[in-house]
Every structure is written in structure tokens, then in C-alpha cells.
Image (spheres, rainbow, N blue to C red):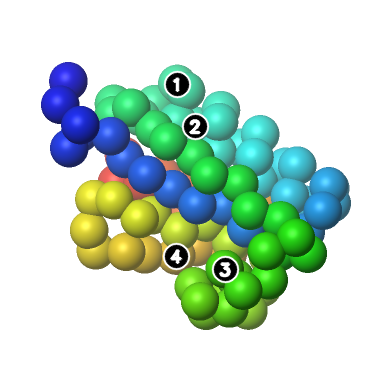
Amino acid sequence: MTEESIHRFRLYIVDSSPAGKRAITNFQRITGTLYQYPVELEIIDILEKPAMAEADHIIAVPALIRLEPFPIIKIIGDLSNVAGLRAFLGI
């Protein structure tokens, strides 16, 4: 696979909140079983890096951003809505 085929995501969470943990687990479960592209996930704690959250216009967490491929899109929540997450991922 080429470098262009890697899909990059950024997940904003707060510390080790239950919703943040669920979002990580749900994302990994869906991308590990149904997603056809290699995935790179960057997890950002907004308490540690508030400037990044501000730069990405994050107003609620957990928040998942698809960075690549373009266009950049966002989804908010713990990613437990499987249908919504699948639509976000295009699967």
C-alpha cells in the first residue's frame, strides 16, 4: 500500500473519561473489523493540549476528526452509534 492510502484521524478526549475510553474502543473495533484502509489514530487529551483543540474548533468531546483523505470532517460523541460511525467512515 502507498502512503496515500493511510487514513489519518484525530480523537479528542478529556483525560481518561468513560466516554473517551468508549470512543477509543468503538473506533478501534469498527476500523479493526470493517475498515479496508490502514488507519492512523492520534489521541489528544484536551486538558494537556488545549491549543490543539482550539485550533481544530473542538467544542465538545469526544470528537473525532478525519484528517486524511480530504475533506476534513468531524463527528462528536463516544462513537457508540455504529450506523453513524460507519457513515462517517464511508463503510
Of callouts 2 and 3, the N-terminal one: 2
- The residue that disc 2 covers is 30
Give whichever of discs 3 and 1 has the lower sequence position. Answer: 1
Closest to the observer: 27 or 53? 53
**Residue 74 in the image: x percent, y percent?**
44, 65
In the image, taking residue 32 as reference, residue 17 lies left or right, namely: right
Per the image, the residue denoted by label 3 is: 52
Asked whether the viewer can see residue 62, the reply is no
User: Is mark 1 in CB contact (under 8 Å) with mark 2?
Assistant: yes
40 above or below 16? above
Q: Secondary structure at mark 2?
A: helix
Lateral position of residue 17 relative to residue 23, left or right: right
Which quarter shows the C terminus?
top left
Write the residue at 51% across / 76% down.
Answer: 55
Q: Considering only vertical position in the picture, is 32 above or below 30?
A: above
Q: Are marks 2 and 4 in contact (CB under 8 Å)?
A: no
Q: Position of residue 28 (x, y in %)?
A: 55, 31
Q: Amino acid at mark 2?
A: Ile
Identify residue for label 1: 33
**Neighbour tally class for label 1: few under 14, some 14-19, many 20 plus, Cα within 10 Å:** few
Whole-angstrom CA distance, mark 4 to mark 1, is: 21 Å
Q: Nearer the viewer, residue 15 or 19?
A: 15
Q: Is residue 69 left or right of residue 9?
A: left
Where does label 4 land, which residue? 74
2 or 4: tag closer to the N-terminus: 2
Instruction: Give the residue drawn at x 58%, y 78%.
Output: 54
